[in-house]
Amino acid sequence: MTLEQTIVNIARRAKSASSTLLALSTVIKNRVLIRVAELLLEEKEALQRANGKDLQLGVEMGLSAAMLDRLRLTDAVITSMVTALHELCALPDPVGKIEDFVKRPNGLLVGRMRVPLGVIAMIYESRPNVTVDAAALCLKTGNAVILRGGSEAIHSNLALATILKKALISQGVSEDAVQIIPVTDRRAIDILLTQDELIDVVIPRGGEGLIRFVAQNSRIPVLKHYKGVCHLFIDKDADLDKTVPLVINSKTQRPGVCNALEGLLVHQDVAAAYLPVLVAALIEKGVELRGCPKSTAISAQIHTATDSDWGTEFLDLILCVKVVGDFDEAKTYIQHYGSKHTETIVTENYSTAQRFLAEIDASAVMVNASTRFNDGGQLGLGAEIGISTTKLHAYGPMGLEELTTRKFIIYGQGQVRE
Amino acid sequence: MTLEQTIVNIARRAKSASSTLLALSTVIKNRVLIRVAELLLEEKEALQRANGKDLQLGVEMGLSAAMLDRLRLTDAVITSMVTALHELCALPDPVGKIEDFVKRPNGLLVGRMRVPLGVIAMIYESRPNVTVDAAALCLKTGNAVILRGGSEAIHSNLALATILKKALISQGVSEDAVQIIPVTDRRAIDILLTQDELIDVVIPRGGEGLIRFVAQNSRIPVLKHYKGVCHLFIDKDADLDKTVPLVINSKTQRPGVCNALEGLLVHQDVAAAYLPVLVAALIEKGVELRGCPKSTAISAQIHTATDSDWGTEFLDLILCVKVVGDFDEAKTYIQHYGSKHTETIVTENYSTAQRFLAEIDASAVMVNASTRFNDGGQLGLGAEIGISTTKLHAYGPMGLEELTTRKFIIYGQGQVRE
């Protein structure tokens, strides 16, 4: 078989499986998830052997210590996968939920029923635990899934695929519901992205390069976010006692992730009073500060920012600081440099808070809360398959409901249209 | 200015306008709509003069009588545009609506606020009244819109644009909120479809050729349906008294539209009894019937269908007829030949009805109701900008809510993440 035939065949089988997943009961879906959890523990040794192959090849290929670390399926990582599967079982199944059920004047009963999207292709670079995570979320929502992980994790991913398929078969579900692209050839992605008759959605996860590549080459709708350039605006009515922990938490609690703070905006009326306190706290946490001339005039510990610093996703202990004249200047700055991910205001002023929530265009807008809360688990979605910063279908963290759509169901009694 | 500069400039101005539309009050938006309605009547003569130019050119270009008819802005067409604008004013504005508002264990208040999509590009071939319809729906939902109508309606569309802009300016709203591509050069569409940094969604309306072109060339997400190949399945437990009017209405009430019936599936247990009655009624309405061997054996008035008839969108008084062995055969046929638009079952059997609603994958699934009800107005959406048969974002008729998305809003009291 050519590569193209292999990929098309995988997509065809996924589509065929999706038509049976559509009406699968929640009980069966949960039983598959539980069986995956059991098998992860039962077959841990084989799994870690496969993972060992990836690690060895990784060392030979000169992967960094950090990358090898993310690749490693330790006992702790496997335990956390098992825990996540049990938590997912406990979440409500959105499929079949009927919303907005109304009776029309002609007696038709019209409702909107949540149904799976169909076939989802996940293209990712991350750790192999994403394989189980993504497969489980798609399965719980009745979607078939095609997984294409990083080439450096291929042995681990194939071992995980074996476990996933065993669990599906054990409950009488088509093993084609979860498939892993078995080749590392990059052209497989190009072929996958043109199967718009067979695949309903593509979700890329990884660096901006991968995501842009997918977005530009896909004929299938893509759910994505390129990056998280998040800001916190300290309004003139901000409470300093709240401000310091919010800035520290947003920037330093986990600086390498997309909802970490990258830009601090300070209202000029409070800049002279607040900045020295904030700078001291940030520097104590090892944060490097790069600011506008007004901010460097207030604190010598802020270095002068270069043009390329503004709007940069550092993913590191670096923070841009800008003093702004008023709300409108902060808003204009956010519109220009933000990535529609997470924007926070710190203020005690009711009207300013309401205006920020209404006028700022981002997937999550917050008042007096850490940017780190823009996360499916934290916002109550229970689980998350990614974050979308494009507005179609989903905007912000995507949970189980975002892996479904709604069809109209109509109960008639013989009505015809006049 | 080059064509590219013209188009990019239009898209830039639309994006800039969208940031002010975002927070525009419903009162102002409705006032603009009312002003459009007033101006349509006040400036009717100028409008009909511009329309006259299109009609004259259309005659010279040899447009069919039917096409000229659709192009004509008669007094009646203008009155119906005015009525539609008043009805749209009366509909609730989805923007700003807060849903799923919850209190998290840490005290954060988390809700999801409906916000406009941003900038919408409409590419259409239809009658010039679509120009006002689409502009009004986008404006009501706080979206900026770029309209690209058929070249044969360019003078009418530019005259309508003048009215729309006057109405916007009269209420202090940016005239860039509604823009019409002023050139008929087809390359304008290619350029438009690559402006993914400026345009949030593309909605094509027209023939399958146009829609496939847009879907294949767009870097911007597309909301679309290619065609409507709708079926009605007469189950063995169907009530004949309901069946006949349902089939006649679905097929003949308006055969040229996407929710008209194209394929009739008849359970073999009732085929011999029901088909003769149905055939007589359909032939009386001028419907040509093309069927499978089993159906032609029952009625000599059914012609033998060719392979290319199955799954065809006739948009005409032609109907395919197939006798099926059971529910599963009907389901398999629908999955293979259907276009995920509208599927109806006629049955008195409770379990069969429920199974059809759950298992058939289409934007609208119905029991004992005419396929013609798959329409925004009929299903209670109030207004409709199109129908989507892809599952992302919208599935089925798209009303005002489908022109919005939801962002997360978070009311904190200083919470940080642990």
Image (cartoon, coloured by chain):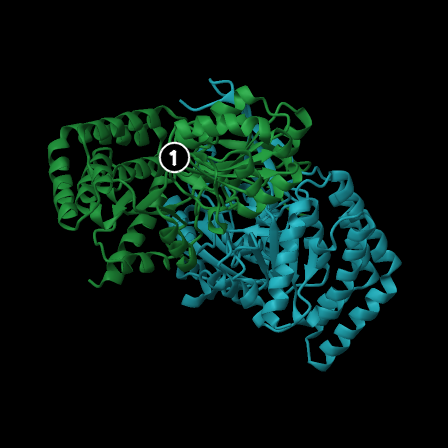
Chain colours: A green, B cyan
Name the spot of residue A363 as percent of width and height, x first.
52, 38
The residue nearer to you, when weighing A254 against B341, is A254
Give me the residue at 71% from left, 66% from top. B70
| Label 1 secondary element | loop
B287 up-or-down from A369: above or below: below
- Locate the C terminus of chain B by quadrant: top left
Label 1: which residue?
A255
Give me the residue at 77% from left, 54% from top. B81
Relative to A307, A42 lies left or right? left
The answer to whether residue A281 of the structure is visible from this angle is: yes
Name the spot of residue B339 as percent of width and height, x first.
47, 54
Task: Give the chain of mark 1.
Answer: A
The residue nearer to you, when weighing A392 against A339, is A339
Q: How many marks?
A: 1
A409 up-or-down from B385: above or below: above
The residue nearer to you, when weighing B396 against B144, is B144
Relative to B187, A84 lies left or right? left
Neighbours of disc 1 within 10 Å: few (<14), some (14-19), many (20+)? many
Name the spot of residue A95 as percent of width and height, x first.
43, 34
Name the spot of residue B151 as percent of width and height, x first.
66, 71
A155 up-or-down from A350: above or below: below
* Amino acid identity at mark 1: Pro
Give me the residue at 61% from left, 29% from top. A270
The answer to whether residue B130 of the structure is visible from this angle is: no
Give residue A19's quadrant in the image.
Answer: top left
- Locate the N terminus of chain B by quadrant: bottom right
Relative to B214, B174 lies left or right? right
Give me the residue at 43% from left, 51% from top. B334
The residue nearer to you, when weighing A275 against B27, is A275
